[in-house]
Image (cartoon, rainbow, N blue to C red):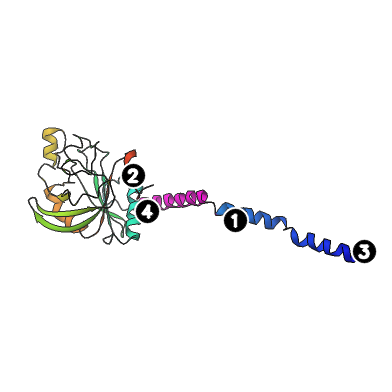
């Protein structure tokens, strides 16, 4: 009789896992859930971004908004991981702000310090005081949003200028063909604002004051990152560099 019951007992013992094993298995399934992993990754990135942002040496300037910074930081990190950013400078241009404001920040990401802040123009068909319309089309004379990597400096009709390569297909990838570059312009000045109530506009280039254009170009040339920000839902839906 015993030899019949014993196998049955052994079968039951080895067929059922203890409750703590089942609970651990349940936890393992939860941890590997793609949605949970994505949420945890995003939360960790937000925390990292806030920490970095709060430690930036403003150098006497105010900081860009956290919304523009975290988007710029995300794309900067991705481009750096891809080996496209070599010069560890992040330039943020916030086109949600009035052109009468200094809306360009140049941040040294190694020293976590703002090294320059300036006026910057938008394209003449993007808007008057505010930029509201953007395009990647040649001769649209509009600004393009998104991430750029700086190229080589050269002497052009505006003097020392800097070529830009758009990193986002369908958003700004035609920048070089459109001759969207950084250059100095006399219409980017406080005196122009005083006379007209707004900044002068370009043909799509992020033009800057002549007073700082050489220093700026020498600082950010050769594969640093530029991010032109605007809280545009269209941009966010198309971009693969911001989430």
Q: Earlier in the sequence, mark 2 or mark 3?
A: 3
Q: Earlier in the sequence, mark 4 or mark 1?
A: 1
Q: Which residues are magenta?
A: 32-56
Task: Inspect the magenta stretch and tell me whether residue 71 lies in it.
Answer: no
Q: Nearer the viewer, mark 3 or mark 4?
A: 3
Q: Nearer the viewer, mark 1 or mark 2?
A: 2
Report the residue marked by disc 2.
238
Q: Main secondary structure of the magenta part?
A: helix
Report the residue marked by disc 4.
52
State the image coordinates of residue 27 (x, y, percent, origin top left): 61, 54
- Name the element at disc 4: helix
- Name the element at disc 3: loop
Residue 17: image quadrant is bottom right
Q: Earlier in the sequence, mark 1 or mark 2?
A: 1
State the image coordinates of residue 200 (x, y, percent, origin top left): 13, 39
Q: Do callouts 3 and 4 mark residues in contact (Cβ within 8 Å)? A: no
Report the residue marked by disc 1.
28
Q: Nearer the viewer, mark 1 or mark 3?
A: 3
Report the residue marked by disc 3.
1
Left of 14 or right of it: where is 28?
left
Q: Earlier in the sequence, mark 1 or mark 3?
A: 3
The residue shown at (66%, 54%) is 23
State the image coordinates of residue 227 (x, y, percent, origin top left): 27, 49
Quadrant of the rendering where the N terminus is positioned: bottom right
The Cα–Cα distance between marks 2 and 3, rounded to whole angstroms, is 74 Å
Residue that protrudes farthest toward the right in the picture: 1
Give the class, few, some or many, for how many residues have Cα within 10 Å of label 1's Cα (few <14, many ≥20).
Answer: few
């Amino acid at each position: 009789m015993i030899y019949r019951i014993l196998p049955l007992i052994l079968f039951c013992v080895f067929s059922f896992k203890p409750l703590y094993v089942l609970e651990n298995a349940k936890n393992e399934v939860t941890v590997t859930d793609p949605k949970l992993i994505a949420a945890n990754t995003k939360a960790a990135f937000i925390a990292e971004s806030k920490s970095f942002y709060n430690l930036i040496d403003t150098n006497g300037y105010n900081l860009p908004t956290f919304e523009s910074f975290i988007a710029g930081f995300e794309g900067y990190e991705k481009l750096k991981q891809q080996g496209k950013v070599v010069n560890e400078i992040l330039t943020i241009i916030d086109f949600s702000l009035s052109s009468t404001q200094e809306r360009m920040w140049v941040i040294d990401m190694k020293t976590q310090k703002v090294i320059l802040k300036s006026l910057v123009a938008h394209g003449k068909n993007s808007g008057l005081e505010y930029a509201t319309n953007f395009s990647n089309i040649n001769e649209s004379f509009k600004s393009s949003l998104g991430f750029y990597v700086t190229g080589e400096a050269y002497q052009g009709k505006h003097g020392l200028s800097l070529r830009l390569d758009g990193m986002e297909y369908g958003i700004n990838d035609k920048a070089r063909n459109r001759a969207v570059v950084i250059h100095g312009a006399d219409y980017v000045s406080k005196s122009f604002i005083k006379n007209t109530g707004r900044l002068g506009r370009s043909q799509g280039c992020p033009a800057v004051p002549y007073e700082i254009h050489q220093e700026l170009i020498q600082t950010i040339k050769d594969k640093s990152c530029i991010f032109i920000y605007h809280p545009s839902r269209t941009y966010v839906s198309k971009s693969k560099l911001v989430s």
